[in-house]
Image: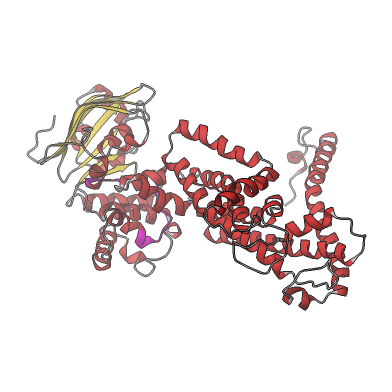
Amino acid sequence: MATVTTAIKAEARDLNFFYSNGARALKGISMPLYENKITALIGPSGCGKSTFLRCFNRMHDLYPGNKYQGEIVMHPDNTNVLDSGVDPIEVRMRISMVFQKPNPFPKSIYENVAYGLRVRGENNKRIMDDKVEEALKGAALWNEVKDRLHDLAFNLSGGQQQRLCIARALATDPEIMLFDEPTSALDPIATANIEELMVELRSKLTILVVTHNMQQAARVSDYTAYMYLGELIEYDDTDKIFTNPGRKETEDYITGKFG
Amino acid sequence: MQLPAQLTISPRLAKNIRRNVKERIIELILMMAALVAVATTFAIVGVLLYESLSFFKTVSVIDFFTDTQWTPLFEDAHYGIMPLVSGTLTTSAIALAVAVPIGTISAIFLSEFASHKTREIVKPILELLVGVPTVVFGYFALFFVTPLLQSIYPSLPSFNMLGAGIVMGVMIIPYIASMSEDAMRAVPMSMREGSYAMGATRFQTAIKVVTPAAISGIVAAYILAVSRAVGETMVVAIAAGQQPNLTFNPLDSAATITAYIVQVAMGDLPHGSIGYQSIFAAGLVLMAMTLSFNIFGHWVRKKYRESY
């Protein structure tokens, strides 16, 4: 395990997850997320990395019959986000998410970014304007859209739509941001923009990113976790994982022997 | 560009005459099947126009649209379509006032809140309502809903537009509910997840994201419902009364265009008489009304079409 002095923002403790059909998708995962760092989850398709990511904001609650076992504890308040007494809506207000495919709402650019504020009951136009501008600047989209904030979001390009989704997630000042393969639907230039953005965002929040692209993990992340068949095989500094992995399975995967 | 001969000539690539003929025949059959519906529509419009033309030789178009009485079968004949149009619009408006809110809310419930099991039970039952013959709805309006309304408004006549309109509304709820639900279910799950991930509740997601995303389908459902209401015959003929009456008051009795047509078409009018021709003129107006609603609906759908 990595020897670090950084603060832990959240921590999975012996986390198991079962889909409604009884399949055990996660097997006893324990790992920390360090504050203001980017942690990447890599592994072959079906290894459970997206399932794990979606535990953090309780996305699995949307489908009946899914079951969590174990804890994901957020620091410093020691809240177990998986506790049945914790409101998933509260969790999602602290942990936001960016999806694989850009999924803007059928609304204007402005309203997309303002959405999170609106669902929190914010109606003050001044505050809203400021927050929207700040979020769009934070997502490096402001200059491209400032003259057409009231255009439909679908008119943006794929890369712009994804940055809009990041702005949307940023607008509510989350503590953790989850990225579920955020660039898999984008071209190389848009991908580079998003990666750059993630590195910038690191100073403000803690990032967990699932990626299929190992170069991406190597480029952007501080820590990397390799998962296989629902188990966490190895978790360490990204440099260490990619130069001198501790486990044979990790080495096989990152050198392309399988996966 | 001309390809060299040896590249194009291969026995497998050469034209297969038998296959081509078969394809042509199938194509022809398919096209003829499609043409039946199109040809019927044109034939109907043709007949309507032809008979109406003879009607408008006797009655001026201005009288037709400005006269406030419709009494084509009386001694003192008047040919003002407006009383029938007002009856049609009033009953349709009542029907929509009932069906649009209930249908839309049912669709939101079925699509966003109901469990899979509930939906599988409720939706077929709702759609069963479509199968009830409209004449049954008509008597339901006359003998059940109107007496019920009369206990609230004792002065309500036995034939009134309110009762007929309400029952007609109930009748078209399934159209709106079922079609809107289909439209909402077609909204990709990723969009809902995006909303939930922002901390939205189920209700916020349904109202602020799913409904706007499905709006073109929902509007299409409304338009279909309008066409159904405007064209509905039995309920209004039975329960709304058959006296043409230029009024928008739902508590009055009045005739709709369809009620007039069915009333007169059942009588023994001599072929070619002005009364006979008046049916076609009324039918033409009805057709123009439904057509304009459909065109409007088409335009709205195009304008608000969402690409996910």
Name the spot of residue A80 as percent of width and height, x first: 17, 34
How far across and down, in percent of the image, does residue B184 sit?
49, 46
Residue A183 can be seen, yes or no: no
Q: Is residue A89 above or below residue B208?
A: above
Position of residue B164 in the picture relative to residue A186 (left or right) = right
Residue B229's image quarter? bottom right
Q: Quadrant of residue B112?
A: top left
A54 sits left or right of B12 in the view: left
Residue B162 lies within the magenta run = no
Frontmost residue, A231 versus A196 = A231
Residue interval drawn in magenta: A94-111
Q: Residue at x 61, y 40 (%)?
A: B129
Picture coordinates of residue B10, whole percent (x, y): 77, 35
Residue A11 on image: x %, y %: 16, 34
Q: Eyeballing the image, is A25 above or below B78? A: above
Task: Work out which residue is located at the far front of the displayed protein and give it.
Answer: B154
The question of residue A104 being in magenta is answered with yes
Give the camera-side residue of B25 and B6: B25
Rendered residue at 32%/55% (across/down): A115
Q: Nearer the viewer, residue B199 or A98?
A: B199
Left or right: residue A105 versus residue A41 is right
Residue at 78% across / 52% down in the picture?
B38
The outermost residue toward the left is A5
- Is residue B215 in view from this perspective? yes
Q: Tell me the quarter of the picture where residue B70 sits.
A: bottom right
